[in-house]
Image: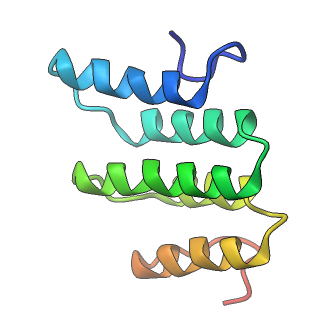
Amino acid sequence: VSLTNANSSPNEAIAVLDQMLERGHLPDANHYASVLTACGLLISDMNERYNKLFAVYQRMLKQGLRPRDTIFRHMRTFLKDHPEYCEQVLAEARKYNVKLQGASD
């Protein structure tokens, strides 16, 4: 299963992360960015998309990875039509001193 296969579901992309961990391979920020992309492209309902994106983000943090600007850009891109959700992404980015181009701060 590819992380961004158009025929797969976001849950299948997340399952790839589980399989990696089961085999002793730690997913890196690029793997998480791919899963965020799958969630952003394959989930049409904005509330469900938001919940899934932030669940994947929280999972990445629990693994001990520090989010990079790429992670926040992916999240903001897929939540761009919902200003409140975008503000939450920007607030998370500020926690890590990440400045996103086009952000008001």
Describe the colour scheme in one phrase: rainbow
Q: Is residue 62 left or right of residue 96?
A: left
Outermost residue toward the left? 24
Q: Count of labels shown?
A: 0
Q: Is residue 83 left or right of residue 52?
A: right
The answer to which image quadrant residue 58 occupies is bottom left
Residue 57 image position (x, y, % from top left): 44, 54
Give me the residue at 53% from left, 22% from top: 3
Residue 39 image position (x, y, % from top left): 62, 39
Outermost residue toward the right? 81
Q: Is residue 44 left or right of residue 9?
A: right
Give me the residue at 22% from left, 25% from top: 21
Quadrant location, the C terminus: bottom right
Outermost residue toward the top? 1
Outermost residue toward the bottom? 105
Give the vertical position of 48 relative to 105 (above or below): above
Residue 35 image position (x, y, % from top left): 53, 35
Q: Nearer the viewer, residue 66 or 21?
A: 21
Q: Is residue 21 left or right of residue 96?
A: left
The answer to which image quadrant residue 50 occupies is bottom right
Q: Nearer the viewer, residue 42 or 100?
A: 42
Q: Nearer the viewer, residue 17 or 102?
A: 17
Give me the residue at 57% from left, 60% from top: 72
Q: Nearer the viewer, residue 101 or 35?
A: 35
Give me the residue at 54% from left, 60% from top: 69
Give the vertical position of 91 relative to 98 (above or below): below
